[in-house]
Image (cartoon, rainbow, N blue to C red):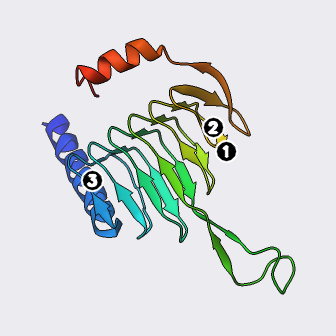
Amino acid sequence: MLRQVFKKIYRLRRFFFRAIVLNQARECGRGLKVNSWSWVSKETKLADNVNFNGMSIRGSGSVVIGSNFHSGKDCLIISDIHNYEGTEIPYDSGLIKKNVVIEDNVWVGDRVIVLGGVTISEGAIVQAGSVVTKDVPKCAIVGGHPAQVFKFRDIERYERLKDEGRFH
C-alpha cells in the first residue's frame, strides 16, 4: 500500500516538473521526461525524447537541445555573460548572448556546467562534474574543468545502434 502511494507521488511530481518545462520552453518535441526540478529559459528549444533529471537553463541566448538527450542531476547551462568591457567595472548592466547547441544523442552527467558559446556534437558524453567551455567533437567523451577529450566512443557501433533506432 505504501509503495503504491509513493509511486503515485513520484508520477505526480514528474507530471508537475514536465508541465513547468513545457510552459517555459519555446519549442518542445515529443516524449519529454522531467524526473526532477528543472527550469529552462524562454529561448530553449527541445527536440524529441529529451530527459532531464535536474536541469537549469539560464540566460538570454538560444539553447537548442537535440533528440535523445539525457542529463544527470543538478546540471546548469548558462547562455549569456555580463559585459565586463562596458562602461562600468567590474561589469555594466548589459548582457552578451552566448548560444548553446547540444546535438542528438548526448549524455551529460551529474552536476555538469555548460557555458555559453558552446556546441556539444552528436553522440558526445560529458563526465559528471565537468565544466564545458569549448566545443565538443562528435562521439567524444570529455571530462574535467575545463572539459577535455580523453576518449572517443566506438563510432562504428554508435552508427549501427543509431541506424537500428536503439535509443534509451
Residue 68 is left or right of residue 151, and the answer is left
User: Residue sitting at 56 percent across and 19 percent down?
Assistant: 152
Q: Are marks 3 and 1 in contact (CB under 8 Å)?
A: no
The three-letter code of the residue at mark 3 reads Arg
For label 1, the residue is 134
Q: Position of residue 117 (x, y in %)?
A: 62, 56
Q: Compute the Cα span from label 2 to label 3.
A: 26 Å
Q: Position of residue 111 (x, y in %)?
A: 57, 42
User: Residue sitting at 38 percent across and 40 percent down?
Assistant: 69
Give the camera-side residue of 135 and 3. 135
Nearer the camera: disc 2 or disc 1: 1
Give the camera-side residue of 112 and 46. 46
When the figure is inspected, residue 63 is found, relative to residue 107, above or below; the finding is below
Q: Quadrant of the C terminus?
A: top left
**Sequence order check, earlier mark of 2 and 3:** 3
The three-letter code of the residue at mark 1 reads Lys
For label 2, the residue is 129
Residue 144 is left or right of residue 90, and the answer is left
**Sequence order check, earlier mark of 2 and 1:** 2
Q: Quadrant of residue 116?
A: bottom right
**Sequence order check, earlier mark of 3 and 1:** 3
Give the camera-side residue of 2 and 55. 55
Return the mark for residue 13.
Answer: 3
Give the camera-side residue of 143 and 97. 97
Q: Quadrant of the N terminus?
A: top left
| Label 2 crowd (10 A; few <14 / some 14-19 / many >=20) | some
Return the mark for residue 121.
Answer: none
Residue 62 is left or right of residue 128, and the answer is left
